[in-house]
Every structure is written in C-alpha cells, then in structure tokens.
Amino acid sequence: MTTFTGELDELTGFLKRSAFDRAFKDALETAAEQEHILSLGFMDIDFMKGLNEKYGHQIGDEVLKKVAAAISRFAGEEAVVSRYGGEEFTILFLGLEREQAFLRLERIREAMDEVHEFEAKTSKANLKATLSAGVAAYPTDGQTEAEVLRRADQALYRAKATGRNKVCMSQEERMRTKTTHYTLTQLERLHRLSQEEGVGEAVFLREALDDLLIKYRVSEIES
C-alpha cells in the first residue's frame, strides 16, 4: 500500500485519522488538478462493542489485527488506509472507480467471513466477526473531502440498516425521480466487472433491493 508520512496506529500499522485526513485532502487536490478519479471506502466491524464485552479486549484486538491483515492483502498497492476510529477504517482507492473499489471491499469482507478463530496471549475464541462497508467516489459522488466522506458514510449506514455483513455503494447516479434502480449502462458495467473479478452478479444486484428496504424502513443502527 502507498505510504504517507504521518502518525501510525500501533495496533494495525495504518494511518491515524488526522494523518489520513491530510492524505485524503492532498489526494483529492491532485485528482482535481489532473482530472483523475478516486474512491473512498468506509468500513466498520459489526457489533464490535458486544465482541469486546463478551470475549474481552485482547480478543477484540485480535479481530482488529485480522481485519487489518485482510485490508492489507486485498486493498491494493495504491490504497491509503487508516484506522479512522475504534473499529472503523477508511480506505482511499487512488485511480479506481466506485464499482472497482466495491470489488476490493467485497474481497476484504469475504476474507473476514472465512475467519472463525482468534487467539490472544491468554485467551482464545471461536467467533464470526463480520464487516459492513460503504463506498463513494470523486467526482461522481462529491467534489470535496466532506461530500465524499459523507456519501461513503451514508452507504455504510445503509449496509448496516439492511442486514450488515455487506458492502453498499453510494446511491448517487443510480437513482431516478421516485424510483431506485440500475440503468442499463450500469448493469452492463457491473456485469463486465463481475466477470473480470470473479464476483457474482448477485452481489451487485442485491444493492437494488437494499435501496428499496432502506427507503421504506427507518431503524436505529447498533454499532
């Protein structure tokens, strides 16, 4: 992954939030000057508070390390990653469209779905730690750091509101007045990407159903 100067989180080795914010600002300015694209993923460990309470913080730390390992493996060499909060990660995908970043996040999510054993110095636990994520892109979803981050955060909220353990894309440019659905061009692009990356089309089409669920159901989300 791309290295930026700044303070690093001791547990994961990723940038701390303040350093990532500076890196994000610089990357966005460069993208604007050179007319490049970039995407931002906002990823969260589901029910992390409950995991810490049930298994202890040592196991909680092991969960964070496993997530960090999955991100390092699948985010890509150009990705810029931070531990944005306690159980939150941001991943900046330089030069990638939203759908391409979606595939990277989906691989990270699937990797954690396969991990069931966590071992610390004095404890061991068999559990399933799942991930929810949202992704938005510049300039598709916003022109500033705040706009892109907000769109990614909204997509993350939608992932949690519709069942967790999934990745959702920003709804920008996927909605028409009073309806929520994919356009033909977007379906064709997603079909091509699914074939190239070996990810089932159902993963993408699931998003359309999620949009309808979040539109007609309002619920409080537990971290």
Image: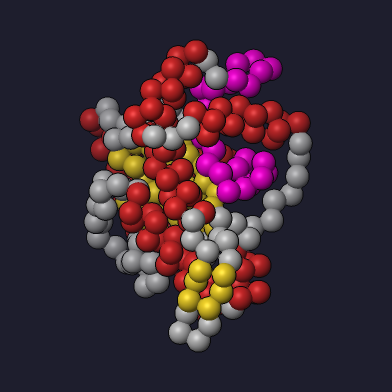
Nearer to the camera, 37 or 114: 114
Q: Give coordinates of residue 74: x percent, y percent.
A: 35, 49
Residue at 49 percent across and 61 percent down: it is 115
**Magenta highlight on residue 195:** no
Residue at 33 percent across and 35 percent down: it is 96
Quadrant for residue 214, please give it.
Answer: top right
Q: Is residue 39 left or right of residue 187?
A: left
Asked if residue 111 shows in the view, the reply is yes
Q: Give coordinates of residue 164: x percent, y percent.
A: 62, 48
Residue at 51 percent across and 69 percent down: it is 117
Residue at 69 percent across and 17 percent down: it is 178
Asked if residue 138 shows in the view, the reply is no
As drawn, the residue found furthest toward the top would be 184
Quadrant for residue 66, please give it.
Answer: bottom left
Q: How is the image coloured?
A: secondary structure
Q: Is residue 110 left or right of residue 81?
A: right
Tell me if residue 129 comes above or below residue 151 in the rendering.
below
Q: Give coordinates of residue 199: x percent, y percent.
A: 43, 35
Q: Which residues are magenta?
A: 156-181
Q: Give coordinates of residue 156: x percent, y percent.
A: 56, 44
**Magenta highlight on residue 159:** yes
Tell me if residue 93 comes above or below residue 141 in the rendering.
below
Nearer to the camera, 36 or 47: 47
Q: Is residue 174 left or right of residue 82?
A: right
Tell me if residue 65 comes above or below residue 143 in the rendering.
below
The C terminus lies in quadrant: bottom right
Nearer to the camera, 208 or 81: 208
Total numbered circles: 0
